[in-house]
Image: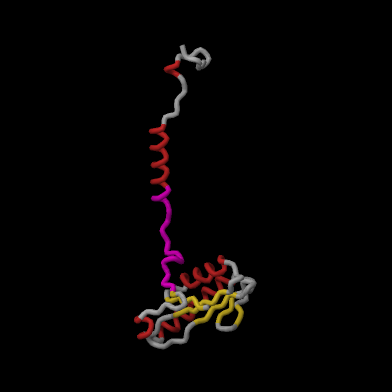
Amino acid sequence: MSTDYYAGLDEDLAPRLQLPALIDMSFLMLIFFMVSATLQRQEADLDLHLPGFSTDASSTSQQVENMRIEIDDNGAVWMNQSIVNAGSEYTVMELLAERLHRYATVVDVSGGEPKVMIRCSGAATEQRFIDVLNACRLARIEQIHVIE
């Protein structure tokens, strides 16, 4: 006789955990979330050049003035040595994306390729750097160089 007592129920009717149904449900949920996720071009897909890295294609391109963006210790964004201040209708990143879009349009018209040089302070937050990358993505700028 067994020492387990199930309130007068037969041992064959004891509650059991059914793992195959749990595993099936887990896979169904995984497939659902994978299918419903949207695929967007993120920062990892941008052509990012780190310091000390050069390609032959970039050296043969036309000389165009590069856009310089600096992020200081406080997270303020400077564009060609002037600070990007947002008014009441734009945020800093929206204003930066608009200015970068105008820059990219002018460079495209002149026959060059828009390039952005980013210098980020070590004390600045990573999110501010990612915001600048997102602004470059919105402006469709793919040549991004990180400088020291």
* Residue nearest the observer in this picture, 34 or 50: 50
Residue drawn at 39 percent across, 42 percent down: 27
Residue 44 placement (x, y as % from top left): 44, 65
Residue segment shown in magenta: 33-48
Residue 45, image x and y in percent? 41, 67
Q: Which residue is nearer to you in this view: 77 or 58? A: 58
Above or below 110: residue 134: above
Q: Measuring 38% from the left and 87% from the top, which residue is drawn there?
A: 62
**Residue 124's quadrant in the figure?**
bottom right
Q: Is residue 142 left or right of residue 127?
A: left
Q: Residue at x 42, y 64 (%)?
A: 41
Residue shown at 41%/32% (left/top)? 19
| Foreground residue among 39 and 86 | 39
Percent across and percent down for residue 88 are 64, 71
Q: Establish if 2 lies above or below 99.
A: above
| Residue closer to the observer: 133 or 36 | 133
39 lies above or below 140:
above
Q: Is residue 93 magenta?
A: no
Q: Is residue 89 left or right of residue 145?
A: right
